Image: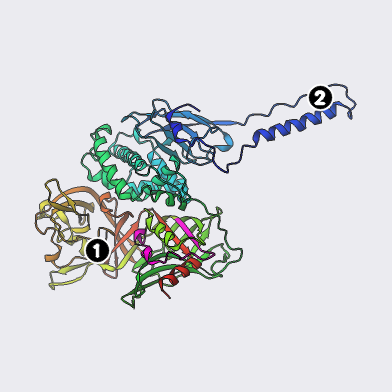
């Protein structure tokens, strides 16, 4: 192994509990036995007086050269290795090499090991980036075992997604590409692509590195749950795990920043803007030295075994508790029969939700209608969902409401005897998000309301689920589109044809960009309020105009509106409300909007299960203001148009208490 500052990333002490290598001892024993047999043979038995031939030396295993290029910009003097023990470091004894000035290196890998282990690149402070110069803060890059040609910030996210969810490389790469809005693959070498999309990928990759470097400083001194310091590799792993849930924010940060989005500027010219953006991203992530250790623990396989005989089970996915007359819970349940594999090897589960507000039960009605591939399915509350266990322990696929597929990797932790208050605090400290419920800061109850002496009873477990969700088309029954019918001067539901003609934007001959508003273009989403350089408040509102006939173009607009304004849609969900009377949907409140076209795309309308579905060929990334991006569709059924979506592949994190732990917590809080 080469001597470089990359070695500072390697823990100097042997890993506790790691078994010593046995291969040399096995060879020594084998040679001793062979010598003994040879000696006995020479002493007689065969009648030969000649000396026995010494055994041939063991043959070296066949090797295959594996070449790779390490890039943020091309990285010189990065230490690359075949990470056989998958600890995220280049350890002594692992095959390694150092990159040249072009970021290139090659390893002679035993043929039997090709495609089995990830590649790690340790970029130390003696390394040099061809775009930005000497590296000032060390960092680690990875590439998946079956895609090692390029090692980059983007492939590092792909490998992080593979490791955390158990998904395959193709699905993980597609998810990263989709969420970042990349035109090319996340596995590609963007430094060789001089197009605008290639430069965008390079900017995103650089922002990922600078954000990770900033987070490394922010998590200095982090300890694991046993009070031991985290290694650099462990810190890098939790940083990139958190980055998986900031992909949409990364994309919009680049697109909304005039310097970062300028493809005529070099990466070096963007460094100042990059550093400022990375600081904001790091702060927004919520990751710090206090919660890095618990987050790492959630990624560590537990030692809780499955019961030998199927039993009734439940897991608490979410709890919000204000008081005994104000709470919400979401539980997944399965009977012993549902936990028994059926003829196809599938398991099953049901969902239960309960909401109590001011002492009154609020019945839950599922708002969405899902496309299963063959039908629009109004999924009942008591629908029984499917789980397909994987051959890998702790991993499984699930199918929710016959349409929503997900892949999950589960780690289960025994919390028996631990402080109930401390575990609730730990759950709430997680910087990750549940794709359905949101931030864990609002999970559970105020920890101080739980008695300090309360302990989890025997058999209590906390399961951590890393999930990649794949979506089908769906629409909400609650978001119908209406318009003011000029023939009757009254509001009524709109068909798709009426919807597109009423929202032509500046395709209409009498509408210019400075005349756009919610009456002549469809309002899609409103961004957060921000402070302009002159000290005034503003927000951005995104609209779309439809060309009816012809090429069926769709033109997306970004409008900056001064003042706090009115809501143009939920910035959290991206759902634009149905148009209201004209006085309420005006684009401005206290200043004229300044609108620009940010993307010209097209749309199509197709028949799908008896419905008409409008979908865009492409959408601007700015439309996704939440952490969970999705594509917009509009669905007409029975002459009524609904707002719909198709979620992009995205990552989610869940923390679930088992039945024993749930019952104990609810009893402690006074919930029957």
Crowding around mark 1 (Cα neighbors within 10 Å: few <14, some 14 to 19, many 20+) is: many
Residue 404 seen in the current view: no
Instruction: Give the quarter of the figure containing the C terminus.
Output: bottom left
Helix, strand or loop status at disc 1: helix
Q: Residue 270 sits in which quadrant?
A: top left
Given the current orientation, which residue lies at the most extreme top position?
50
Decide: is 672 above or below 437: below
State the image coordinates of residue 502 (x, y, percent, origin top left). Answer: 17, 62
Helix, strand or loop status at disc 2: loop
Locate residue 575 relative to residue 353 in the image: left or right: left
The residues tagged by marks 1 and 2 sit, at their Cα atoms, a distance apart of 91 Å
Query: Of residues 335 and 291, which is closer to you in this image?
Result: 291
State the image coordinates of residue 352 (x, y, percent, origin top left). Answer: 42, 71
Decide: is 456 above or below 594: below
The residue sitting at 37% across, 44% down in the picture is 219
The residue sitting at 69% across, 35% down in the picture is 26
The residue sitting at 57% across, 34% down in the picture is 111
Q: Residue 304 sits in which quadrant?
A: bottom right
Decide: is 528 above or below 111: below
The nearer-to-camera label among 1 and 2 is: 2
Q: How many marks?
A: 2
Q: Name the residue under label 2.
A: 52
Q: Does the magenta stretch include residue 453?
A: yes
Q: Mark 1 points at which residue?
A: 496
Query: Of residues 154 and 669, which is closer to you in this image?
Result: 669
State the image coordinates of residue 505 (x, y, percent, origin top left). Answer: 16, 55
Query: Of residues 609 and 236, which is closer to you in this image?
Result: 236
- Span highlighted in magenta in the image: 436-465
């Amino acid at each position: 192994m080469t001597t470089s500052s990359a070695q500072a990333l390697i823990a100097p002490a042997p890993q506790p509990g790691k078994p010593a290598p046995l291969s040399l001892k096995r060879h020594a024993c084998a040679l001793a036995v062979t010598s003994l047999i040879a000696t006995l043979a020479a002493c007689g038995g065969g009648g030969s007086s000649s000396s026995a031939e010494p055994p041939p030396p063991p043959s070296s295993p066949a090797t295959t050269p594996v070449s790779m290029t390490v890039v943020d910009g091309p990285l010189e003097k990065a230490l690359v290795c075949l990470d056989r023990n998958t600890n995220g470091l280049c350890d002594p004894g692992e095959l390694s090499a150092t990159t040249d000035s072009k970021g290139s290196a090659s390893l002679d890998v035993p043929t039997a090991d090709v495609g089995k282990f990830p590649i790690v690149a340790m970029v130390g402070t003696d390394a040099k980036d061809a775009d930005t110069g000497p590296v000032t803060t060390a960092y680690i890059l990875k590439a998946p075992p079956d895609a090692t040609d390029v090692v980059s910030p983007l492939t590092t996210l792909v490998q992080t997604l593979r490791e955390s969810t158990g998904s395959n490389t193709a699905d993980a790469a597609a998810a990263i590409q989709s969420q970042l809005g990349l035109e090319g693959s996340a596995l590609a070498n963007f430094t060789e692509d001089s197009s605008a999309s290639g430069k965008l990928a390079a900017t995103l990759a650089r922002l990922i590195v600078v954000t990770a470097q900033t987070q490394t400083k922010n998590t200095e001194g982090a300890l694991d749950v046993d009070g031991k310091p985290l290694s650099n590799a462990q810190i890098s792993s939790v940083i990139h795990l958190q980055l998986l849930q900031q992909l949409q924010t990364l994309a919009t940060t680049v697109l909304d920043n005039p310097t970062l989005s300028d493809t005529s500027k070099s990466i070096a010219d963007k460094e100042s803007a990059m550093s400022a953006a990375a600081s904001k991203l790091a702060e927004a992530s919520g990751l710090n030295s206090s919660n890095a250790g618990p987050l790492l623990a959630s990624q560590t396989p537990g030692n809780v075994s499955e019961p030998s005989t199927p039993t009734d089970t439940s897991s608490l996915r979410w709890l919000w508790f204000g008081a005994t007359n104000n709470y919400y819970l979401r539980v997944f349940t399965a009977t012993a029969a549902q936990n028994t594999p059926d003829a196809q090897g599938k398991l099953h589960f049901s969902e239960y939700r309960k909401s109590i507000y001011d002492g009154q039960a609020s019945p839950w009605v599922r708002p969405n209608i899902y496309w299963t591939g063959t039908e629009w399915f109004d999924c009942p509350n008591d629908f029984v969902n499917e789980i397909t266990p994987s051959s890998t322990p702790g991993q499984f696929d699930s199918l929710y409401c016959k349409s929503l597929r997900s892949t999950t990797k589960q780690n289960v932790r025994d919390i028996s005897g631990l402080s109930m208050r401390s575990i609730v605090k730990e759950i709430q400290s997680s910087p990750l998000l549940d794709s359905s419920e949101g931030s864990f800061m609002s999970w559970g109850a105020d920890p101080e309301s739980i008695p300090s002496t309360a302990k989890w009873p025997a058999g209590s477990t906390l399961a951590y689920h890393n999930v990649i969700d794949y979506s089908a088309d769906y629409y909400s029954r609650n978001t119908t589109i209406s318009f003011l019918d000029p023939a009757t001067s009254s509001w009524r539901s709109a068909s798709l044809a009426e919807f597109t003609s009423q929202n032509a934007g500046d395709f209409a001959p009498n509408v210019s960009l400075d005349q756009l508003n919610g009456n002549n273009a469809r309002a899609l989403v409103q961004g957060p309020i921000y402070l302009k350089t002159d000290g005034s408040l503003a927000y951005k509102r995104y609209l779309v105009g439809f060309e009816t006939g012809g090429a069926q173009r769709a033109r997306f607009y970004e409008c900056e509106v001064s003042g706090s304004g009115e809501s143009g849609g939920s910035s959290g969900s991206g759902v634009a409300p149905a148009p209201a009377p004209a006085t309420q949907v005006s684009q401005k409140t206290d200043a004229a909007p300044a609108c620009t076209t940010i993307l010209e795309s097209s749309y199509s309308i197709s028949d799908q299960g008896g419905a008409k579905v409008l979908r865009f060929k492409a959408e601007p990334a700015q439309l996704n203001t939440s952490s969970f991006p999705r594509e917009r569709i509009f669905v007409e059924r029975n002459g009524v148009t609904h707002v719909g979506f198709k979620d992009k592949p995205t990552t989610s994190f869940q923390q679930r208490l088992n039945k024993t732990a749930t019952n104990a917590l609810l009893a402690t809080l006074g919930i029957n």
